[in-house]
Image: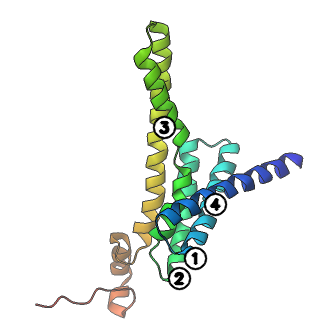
Amino acid sequence: MNDVLTLAAEAVADGLFAVVACIGFALISNAPRPVCLVAGVLAGLGHMTRFVLLHAGMGITSASLCGATLVSFCSMACARRWHTPAEFYAFPALLPMIPGMYAYRTILATMHFLSATEAVDRETLLVDIAYNALTTCSVMGALVIGAIVPLFALHGESPLTRWYRRATGAEKRGGGHEAPPRQG
């Protein structure tokens, strides 16, 4: 029971740090204050999800993908609720999940690699460079996929939504959001 409570407390602390970082990112982007607060809550939710999945044994790339997908789906709901673009909520909320430490370690190992003279040191540093660079790129890719797929899949004019409307006959019945006919 203590382990669960400790994990929950650590997850909440991790989420609160993400909230602060997200609100800071949103404020320097000149977003409206209500958007900043909602994006902060989404950032905390996404970061806590990633934290719990990491502690459950999932890799950082998969956990980041799950957290980003959750943030993106929630941002779609917020966008519908408050009639604002979902990107206003999703992008600031995903910024705290960027793997800055892995990117920093990549640059640091590269600098040490360039100045190393021993072959053994260079081999060890080359492994560090490859591991950290691949981790950075894969997590960034997971964040992009997690953010964009729900935004594209659920948008009213996305190819998936248009295909679904055509397949179910919703266009003929007047359902969905059709674009007005072009003039001239």
Sequence-earlier tag: 4 or 2: 4
Disc 3 marks a residue whose amino acid type is Ala
Residue drawn at (56%, 60%) of the image: 24
Disc 4 marks a residue whose amino acid type is Val
Disc 2 marks a residue whose amino acid type is Trp
Residue for badge 2:
82
Q: Is residue 31 left or right of residue 169?
A: right
Local SS, label 1: helix
Badge 3 crowding class, 10 Å Cα cut-off, few under 14, some 14 to 19, many 20 or more, is some
Residue drawn at (47%, 69%) of the image: 30
Residue for badge 1:
34
Sequence-earlier tag: 4 or 3: 4
> Does residue 149 appear anywhere in the picture?
yes
Disc 1 marks a residue whose amino acid type is Pro
On residue 87, the disc is none
Query: Residue 138 or 18: which is nearer the viewer?
Result: 18
Q: Does the residue at mark 1 contact the one at mark 2 (Cβ under 8 Å)?
A: yes
Sequence-earlier tag: 1 or 2: 1
Residue for badge 4:
19
Query: Residue 62 or 23: which is nearer the viewer?
Result: 23
Q: Is residue 71 above or below residue 124?
A: below
